[in-house]
Structure formats: structure tokens, C-alpha cells
Amino acid sequence: MSVKKHEQKEEVNNNPQLVEDVVTEMKKLFTFDIMYYVKKPWKLIGLNFLMGVVRGIGFFLGMTIVGAIVFVVLMSTLKKITHANIPIISEWLAKVVILVQENLKMLQ
């Protein structure tokens, strides 16, 4: 396989006209793409709009999944902390629960 690549490299090096032809064809293709969108700007606008919608949906789905994972990790960590009987955090959580219950009674 490397012998074949070596032969191809030699062929390209020995034939500058081949390289020039390839470069010319690539320039024509690139120019054709640009001219296509210059002549039909609504196609370019539509393509950009579609790409924006796809990116937005991808961002939304990705953030939903990441947010759900973070939420699950935080909830499991909070459960472990409350069951660990850590004095400072347990007392603080107890105070929060009491405050919430008092506020609910006041609203009723």
C-alpha cells in the first residue's frame, strides 16, 4: 500500500500540469457554489434558517439531558446528605422545613 502511495506522489510531483488542472477545477466548483447562492439569495436564507432551527433544537435537547442528569445527581446527593445525619446541614434543613410549614399555615 505504501508503494502505491509513493508512486502516486511521484506522479503528482512529475506532472505539475495535473496539479494545476485539479486546482483549476476546484476553483470552478467553489465559484459555482458562491454564484449559485448569489443568484438565489432566498436559498441561502432558507438554508441558514434551517440550520439555525436545527442548532436550536440540538441545544434544547442537549441542555434538557444535561439538566436532567445534574438534577438527578443533586437530588441523590441531597438525599445522602439528609440521611447521613450531618448536624449542621440537618439542622439547617429542619429549619427550612419548619419555615416552609409556617408560611403555608399563614397562607391558609
Image (tube, rainbow, N blue to C red):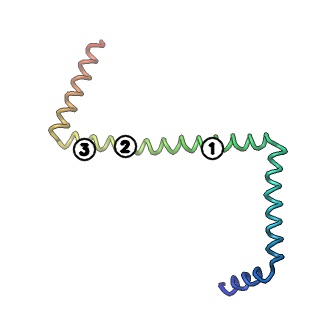
Question: Upstream in the sequence, badge 1 or badge 2?
Answer: 1
Find residue 92 and report its horizontal and vertical position in percent: 20, 32
Tell me the tag on residue 80: 3
Q: Amino acid at mark 3?
A: Lys
Tell me the tag on residue 108: none
Q: Residues within 10 Å of mark 1 (few under 14, many from 20)?
A: few
Find residue 69 and report its horizontal and vertical position in percent: 41, 45
Return the residue found at the far bottom.
3
User: Would you name the residue on which mark 2 appears?
Assistant: 72
Q: Amino acid at mark 2?
A: Val
Q: CA distance from mark 3 to mark 1?
A: 39 Å
Question: Upstream in the sequence, badge 2 or badge 3?
Answer: 2
Residue at position x 79%, y 51% from top? 34
Find residue 88 and report its horizontal and vertical position in percent: 16, 37
Indicate the quadrant containing the C terminus: top left, top right, bottom left or bottom right: top left
Secondary structure category for the residue under label 3: helix
Q: Is residue 51 above or below residue 13?
A: above
Residue at position x 79%, y 39% from top? 42
Question: Upstream in the sequence, badge 3 or badge 1?
Answer: 1
Asked which quadrant contains residue 26, the reply is: bottom right
Tell me the tag on residue 54: 1
Q: CA distance from mark 2 to mark 3?
A: 12 Å
Secondary structure category for the residue under label 1: helix
